[in-house]
Image (cartoon, helix red, strand yellow):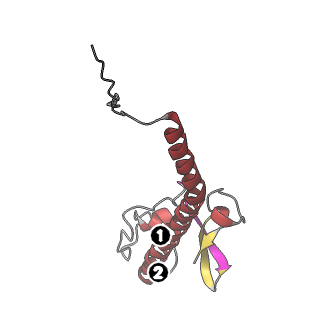
Amino acid sequence: MKFIIMPIKATTKRAGFTLIELLIVMAILALLAGIIGPSLWNKLGGAKHDVALTQIKNIEVALDSYRLDMGRYPKNLDEMVKNNSGKARWDGPYMKSIPLDPWGKAYEYQLSGDHNGREYTLLSLGADGQEGGEGEDKDIHH
């Protein structure tokens, strides 16, 4: 009796990933998040700054319209939404509502401010809600 020895062919199929492959992919994702993440957060802060500046410009247009009709700037921003004066010259509402800044705080408005030659001061105090600051905490005005 003769035995023939034949090589056994490996027919095992590979299903899924090895632990090493998963760790490498996770390391690459963590590296990308570390590089790209901070720049995305900076762009978000810049976008909020741009939104606040646009809202301030829109409020200023409404303030100027109010002044043309009434002969003076309003004592507070709510006077542009609702006629509290009872005067017939009021041709509003000059704004449907007064928006909050992108950080959810009210815009600061004061009469008799001497800001850029204007009779009022209008600004957002930024992310921290306090005067001054840098970056996203910086005060925003036109």
Quadrant housing residue 9: top left
Farthest residue toward the bottom?
Answer: 117
Residue type marked 2: Asp
Residue 38 shown left or right of residue 19 in the figure:
right
The residue at which mark 2 appears reads as 64
* Residue at x-position 42% and y-position 80%: 65
Q: Magenta part mainly helix, strand or loop? A: strand
Q: Name the residue under label 1.
A: 55
Going by the picture, which residue comes out furthest to the top? 1
Mark 1 and mark 2 in contact? Answer it, CB < 8 Å: no
Question: Height in image: 20 above or below 89?
Answer: above
Residue at image position (37%, 34%) is 14
Instruction: Identify the secondary structure beneath mark 1.
Output: helix
Against 12, residue 96 (above or below) is: below
Residue at 71% x, 63% y is: 131
Q: Position of residue 36 (x, y in %)?
A: 55, 59
Answer yes or no: is residue 85 visible. no
- Residue 22 appears at what percent x and percent y? 49, 39
Identified by mark 1, the residue type is Gln
Magenta-highlighted residues: 104-114
- Mark number, residue 93: none
- Residue 13 part of the magenta segment: no
Residue 112 forms part of the magenta stretch: yes
